[in-house]
Image (spheres, rainbow, N blue to C red):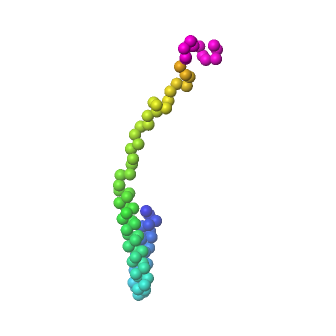
Amino acid sequence: MPRLEEIHANLRDRLQEAKEQGWLGEVAAIEASLAAAEQKLTAMRDLATQHTTVHLGMPDFRATTGRLIPEPGPGQDATRPRGDG
């Protein structure tokens, strides 16, 4: 937004100069640009004041996490590591 504010201020200065010099065509063009810059600044300020935070909540990993070693099947000893069978 600082850049647009700088452009807006420059347009006001150029408009004053164009009026002092009697450059009527330039005055009309600068006034159109100045109006557009003012609209954009207003829109940007309005957007900046809005609450834009989105609450995503806490992730639930219970469904995706589990045991790394499968439960022993029927006839397997749960106290012995797999592969020592």
- Does 55 sit above or below residue 62? below
Given residues 79 and 47, the one toward you in this image is 79
Identify which residue is drawn at 57% across, 13% down.
76
Left or right: where 64 falls relative to 16: right
Task: Residue 74 in the image: state x and y as whole percent.
Answer: 54, 14
Identify which residue is drawn at 38% across, 69% down.
38
Is 45 covered by the magenta stretch? Answer: no
Task: Residue 77 in the image: state x and y as whole percent.
Answer: 57, 12
Report how many numbered discs are placed on residues in the image.
0
Q: Magenta segment, which residues? A: 72-85
Task: Residue 53 in the image: state x and y as whole percent.
Answer: 39, 48
Name the image quarter holding residue 50.
Answer: bottom left
Task: Residue 5 in the image: state x and y as whole percent.
Answer: 42, 67
Main secondary-structure element of the magenta-colored stretch: loop
Name the quarter where the N terminus is drawn: bottom left
Is 83 covered by the magenta stretch? Answer: yes
Left or right: where 70 falls relative to 38: right
Residue at the far right in the pictured view: 84
Residue at the far front in the pictured view: 74
